[in-house]
């Protein structure tokens, strides 16, 4: 029953995604009658680009049966996005692009491997250090409080959806009794419920930002705070399936960038 429900959700996400992409392609040529005809042509659309560096603060929801002393480690990210400016709307805009996020988690747990005898007594004798490498492709709607074309400083809100892809992860396992590393390498960290492709998932984004335009009003500095709520959990298997732990992570990013 759960498998059928998951497959249904995957098909729904896939269909909605393709419909949304098609609507974006068709959008520049639409016309609407509202007290007169409004036509937006491709040549009327202005595209601006923005590159940002992000500081990442992670929030984890651990599985208490298999994880203890869970802590997030400092992460970072890079963002490159395009902003569509429609002449008929000075405040509403569309943002699409790509983001890379590197974040980490440290927790105590078991370690199952030849030569190690482990009881499920929640002693958690081994520390696991995991670094996650993720890719986000966000589609965001941006609403400015004031017109950015008329003010040097403007405040805005934005929210939307992102496709999230797990690029990979690295792990280290340390024996707490003698502080020696017993294993390290690349872990096959996966997604519990795939969307569109293997290791693909989805996230909801919401944030607030401020833009400071240069005197010529063509470029500017941007400062943003975003919260990402990931819709699916991670599955951590350690080394050669020595663990099988599900946990969820969300994150808050504080970024500074430049729009050109």
Image (spheres, helix red, strand yellow):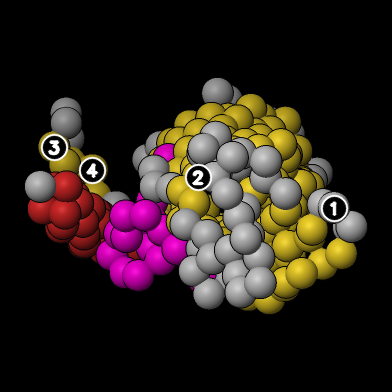
Going from N to C along the chain, the mark reached first, 3 or 4, is 3
Residue position marked by numbered label 3 in the rendering: 33
Q: Residue 42: x, y in percent?
A: 34, 63
Residue position marked by numbered label 2 in the rendering: 247
**Secondary structure under the numbered disc 4 in the rendered image:** strand
Q: Nearer the viewer, residue 256 or 112?
A: 112
1 and 3 marks in contact (CB < 8 Å) = no
Label 4 Cα crowd, 10 Å radius (few <14 / some 14-19 / many 20+): few
Residue position marked by numbered label 4 in the rendering: 38
Label 1 Cα crowd, 10 Å radius (few <14 / some 14-19 / many 20+): few
**Which label belongs to residue 177?**
1
**Secondary structure under the numbered disc 3 in the rendered image:** strand
Q: Nearer the viewer, mark 1 or mark 2?
A: 1
Residue 188 forms part of the magenta stretch: yes
User: How far apart are the two marked residues, 3 and 4, measured between alpha carbons?
Assistant: 6 Å
The magenta span reads 187-205
Q: Nearer the viewer, residue 39 or 246?
A: 246
Q: Nearer the viewer, mark 4 or mark 1?
A: 1
Residue 144 to residue 126: above or below:
above
């Amino acid at each position: 029953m759960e498998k059928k429900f998951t497959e249904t959700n995957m098909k729904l996400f896939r269909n909605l995604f393709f419909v949304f992409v098609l609507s974006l392609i068709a959008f520049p040529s639409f016309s609407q009658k509202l007290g007169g005809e409004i036509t937006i042509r491709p040549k009327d659309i202005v595209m601006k680009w923005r590159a940002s560096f992000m500081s990442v603060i992670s929030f984890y929801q651990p599985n208490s049966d298999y994880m203890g002393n869970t802590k997030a480690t400092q992460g970072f990210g890079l963002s490159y996005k395009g902003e569509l400016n429609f002449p008929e709307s000075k405040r509403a805009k569309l943002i699409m692009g790509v983001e890379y996020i590197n974040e980490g988690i440290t927790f105590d747990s078991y370690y199952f491997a030849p030569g190690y005898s482990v009881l499920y007594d929640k002693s958690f004798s081994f520390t696991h250090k995991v670094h996650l490498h993720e890719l986000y492709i966000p589609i965001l709607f941006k609403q400015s409080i004031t017109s950015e074309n008329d003010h040097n400083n403007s405040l805005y809100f934005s929210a939307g959806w992102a496709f999230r892809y797990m690029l990979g992860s690295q792990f280290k396992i340390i024996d707490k009794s003698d502080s020696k590393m017993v294993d390290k390498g690349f872990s096959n960290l996966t997604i519990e419920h795939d969307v569109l492709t293997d290791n693909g998932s989805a996230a909801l984004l919401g944030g607030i930002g401020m833009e400071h335009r240069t005197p010529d009003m063509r470029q500017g500095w941007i400062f943003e705070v975003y919260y990402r709520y990931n819709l699916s959990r991670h599955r951590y298997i350690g080394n050669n399936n020595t663990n099988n732990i599900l946990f969820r992570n969300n994150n808050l990013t504080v970024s500074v960038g430049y729009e050109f």
